[in-house]
Amino acid sequence: MHVHQLSEELGILVKFLPCSSSQNSEMADIGSVVRRLYLSVYNWAVFFGWAQVLYYLTLALLESGHEAIYAAVERPLQFAQTAAFMEILHSATGKKSYSS
């Protein structure tokens, strides 16, 4: 048997060797922690984005009337709407987990 053939066969065998369940469990735990951390940061950012929209809306309404509202909330509203689009991506990729 040639050295090249032997290395290929060993490489294939190594790929199919089972990982221990503790390694799989650790990887799942790390993935779960990362997902939860990401979703927590994401949810807080969305909350503060909408709170900012409400704050600027209220200020504009009290100070300048309803005509000035959109100009006052345009940027934070764009952020909040972009975050709403991210919600669709989370659902599509399976990141959003309501049971976790």
Image (cartoon, grey):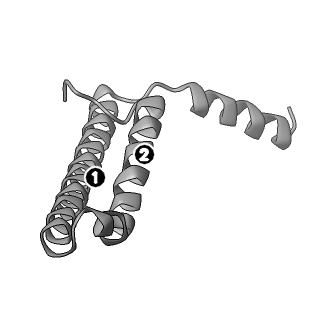
In this view, 84 is above or below 68: above
Q: Which of 92 and 62 is in front in this view?
A: 62
- Secondary structure at badge 2 equals helix
Residue at the spot 15% in from the left edge and 65% down from the top edge: 55
Amino acid type, callout 2: Met
Quarter residue 44 falls in: bottom left
Answer left or right for 24 relative to 92: left
| Amino acid type, mark 1 | Tyr
- Sequence-first tag of 1 and 2: 1
Callout 1 crowding tier (Cα within 10 Å): few <14, some 14–19, many ≥20: some
Where the N terminus falls, by quadrant? Answer: top right
**Above or below for 84 versus 16:** below
Image quarter where the C terminus lies is top left
Badge 2 is on which residue? 86
Cβ atoms under marks 1 and 2 closer than 8 Å:
yes
Task: Identify whether 9 is placed above or below 57.
Answer: above
Residue at 19% from the left image edge and 24% from the top image edge: 99
Q: Residues within 10 Å of mark 2 (few under 14, many from 20)?
A: few
Q: Position of residue 33 (x, y in %)?
A: 23, 45
Q: Name the residue under label 1.
A: 42
Q: Is mark 1 on a helix, strand or loop?
A: helix
Which residue shows up at 12% across the image and 69% down it?
A: 62
Above or below, comparing residue 63 to residue 84 in the picture = below
Give the residue at x 82% y 42%: 3
| Residue 21 in picture, x, y percent from top left | 31, 26
